[in-house]
Image (tube, rainbow, N blue to C red):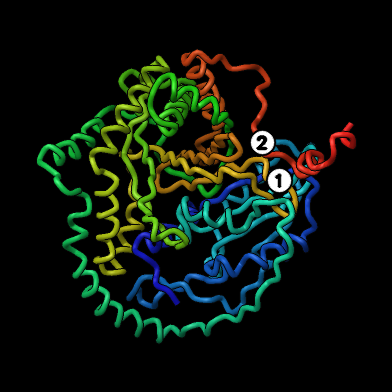
């Protein structure tokens, strides 16, 4: 048994039918699709490396303590690994629609909080995995670690034999209450010893009054006028789409115009929101889109753990600026100030301080956060670097993988970015009822990359091919003697 961290518990407490708090993705592989039984055996062989996948969340009676992770005595892999197929022609629209329906459904809270769907019937003989896992289990960085566990780095990894597993006995409700009472006495004492260090966490050694003023100044731009249609009530269903940008193009833009890869990514998302809001008839003069930019605060010693260790910057996407180079410069300047301000570390300290709050108040505060209308935050944009080497599943190459980021409260759109195989894959989540124009945002993101590339002196070439890892057949051909390849 393991007690959830305050941040993990928050993701569980805020969830309801309209706030499904799972992250996920759509991964497309070259064909042919594996047999369902082969996929089951492959996943079963990897489960010992991710023990949380056989655990479920248990709430403590009367809310006397934070929820705990316990082994599921009724764990059944067939429930979590599912099989379906696309209707013809099996193209991108069909896959996006299927993924949107799957992502819009909450996970069963009585079982381990994850699902993986084997999807057959894609065009060109391809197949896909649609996966989702509750945010209480992993953050974006930890999810990348899981991906590296579940996939292989070679087309022929060799057989892996599943190891026997027996669940630990599930604790009774009375035992959970007793353990929570003990934890309420012991844990605060342990946390109090670390409180002075935690209080100093946002402030690095040598922090001056000027540094504190700089941190405060990062919040001043949030007085700017924000777009009006990006916040409001959300429903239970989701629209989901994706955009593609070549990573080599982004690096060319960065080298010519300055900034980081993440700055360029935010600039392309800014163009997407600008197009969306202009299409909706909004006046963008002096307008910004306020966004959370999550960042990992996971220490190197914490890699391999599956709890959440994320904080966030609060940035403004300058949709009121028409010139693409000026938009990028504005984003770059903001991010430089935010990184120097220590804002993310301050946010991490505040999150960790929630560990001192009574569990009932923590749950109440989390629910209040999602049920109170707000226009402070209008979207979230998270960029997670993926593996730089080709990945395979059951001998077939992973072509590309698009992330899914949930919606929460009154935020109607979120954007996740995942890099793999020379491609930046943008996954765009929208509320089904209020974001019927999600493809305007998608097209705007891709157009944002094209215009920045032109400004950098590298005009986009028609029919630009995706960078991709060599296929298994290509690897085999390269190993053959030259005479045999003729």
Q: Which residue is mark 1?
A: 397
Residue under the image location 30 percent in, 27 percent down: 333
> Can you say whether 412 is above or below 178 in the image?
above
Disc tally is 2
Q: Is residue 16 visible?
A: no
The quadrant of the image that shows the C terminus is top right
The numbered mark at residue 468 is: 2
What is the crowding at mark 1: few (fewer than 14 residues within 10 Å), some, or many (at least 20)? Answer: many
> Can you say whether 281 is above or below 43 in the image?
above
> Can you say whether 43 is above or below 443 in the image?
below
Q: Is residue 52 visible?
A: yes
Residue 351: % across, % down:
29, 56
What is the crowding at mark 2: few (fewer than 14 residues within 10 Å), some, or many (at least 20)? Answer: some
Tell me if 99 is positioned left or right of 185 in this view: right
Label 2: element kind? loop
Residue under the image location 66 percent in, 72 percent down: 76
> Can you say whether 215 is above or below 154 in the image?
above
Mark 2 or 1 closer to N-term?
1
Residue 26: % across, % down:
62, 46
Front-lying residue, 419 or 322:
419
Residue 442: % across, % down:
55, 29
Distance from Cα at disc 2 to Cα at disc 1: 9 Å
């Amino acid at each position: 048994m393991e007690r959830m961290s305050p941040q993990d518990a928050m993701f569980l407490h805020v969830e309801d039918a309209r706030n499904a708090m799972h992250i996920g993705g759509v991964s497309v592989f070259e064909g042919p699709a594996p047999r369902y039984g082969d996929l089951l055996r492959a996943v079963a062989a990897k489960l010992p490396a991710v023990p949380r996948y056989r655990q479920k969340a248990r709430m403590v009676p009367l809310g006397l303590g934070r929820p705990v992770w316990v082994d599921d005595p009724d764990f059944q892999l067939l429930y979590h690994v599912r099989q379906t197929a696309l209707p013809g022609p099996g193209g991108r629209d069909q896959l996006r629609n299927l993924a949107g329906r799957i992502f819009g459904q909450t996970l069963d809270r009585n079982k381990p909080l994850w699902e993986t769907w084997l999807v057959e019937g894609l065009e060109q003989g391809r197949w896909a995995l649609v996966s989702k896992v509750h945010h209480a289990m992993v953050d974006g960085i930890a999810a990348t670690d899981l991906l590296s566990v579940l996939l292989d780095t070679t087309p022929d990894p060799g057989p892996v034999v599943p190891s026997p597993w027996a669940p630990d006995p599930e604790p009774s409700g009375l035992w959970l209450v007793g353990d929570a009472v003990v934890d309420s006495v012991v844990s605060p004492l342990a946390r109090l010893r670390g409180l002075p260090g935690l209080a100093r966490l946002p402030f690095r050694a040598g922090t001056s009054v000027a540094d504190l003023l700089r941190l405060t100044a990062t919040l001043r731009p949030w007085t700017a006028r924000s777009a009006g249609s990006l916040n409001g009530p959300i429903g239970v269903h989701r629209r989901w789409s994706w955009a593609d940008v070549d990573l080599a193009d982004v690096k060319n833009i960065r080298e010519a115009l300055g900034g980081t890869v993440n700055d360029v990514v935010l600039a392309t998302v800014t163009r997407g929101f600008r197009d969306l809001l202009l299409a909706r008839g909004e006046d963008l003069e002096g307008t910004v889109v306020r966004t959370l930019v999550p960042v990992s605060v996971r220490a190197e010693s914490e890699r391999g753990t599956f709890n959440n260790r994320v904080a966030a910057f609060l940035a403004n996407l300058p949709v009121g600026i028409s010139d693409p180079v000026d938009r990028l410069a504005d984003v770059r300047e903001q991010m430089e100030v935010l990184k120097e301000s220590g804002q993310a570390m301050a946010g991490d300290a505040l999150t960790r301080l929630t560990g001192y709050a009574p569990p009932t108040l923590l749950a109440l505060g989390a629910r209040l956060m999602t049920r109170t209308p707000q226009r402070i935050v209008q979207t979230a944009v998270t960029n997670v670097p993926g593996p730089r080497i080709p990945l395979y599943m059951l001998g077939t190459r992973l072509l590309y993988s698009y992330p899914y980021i949930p919606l929460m409260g009154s935020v109607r759109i979120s954007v996740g970015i995942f890099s793999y195989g020379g491609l930046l894959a943008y996954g765009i989540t929208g509320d089904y009822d209020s974001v019927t124009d999600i493809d305007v945002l998608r097209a705007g993101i891709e157009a944002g990359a094209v215009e920045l590339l032109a400004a950098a002196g590298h005009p986009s070439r028609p029919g630009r091919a995706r960078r991709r890892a060599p296929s298994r057949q290509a690897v085999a051909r390269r190993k053959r003697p030259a005479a045999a390849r003729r």
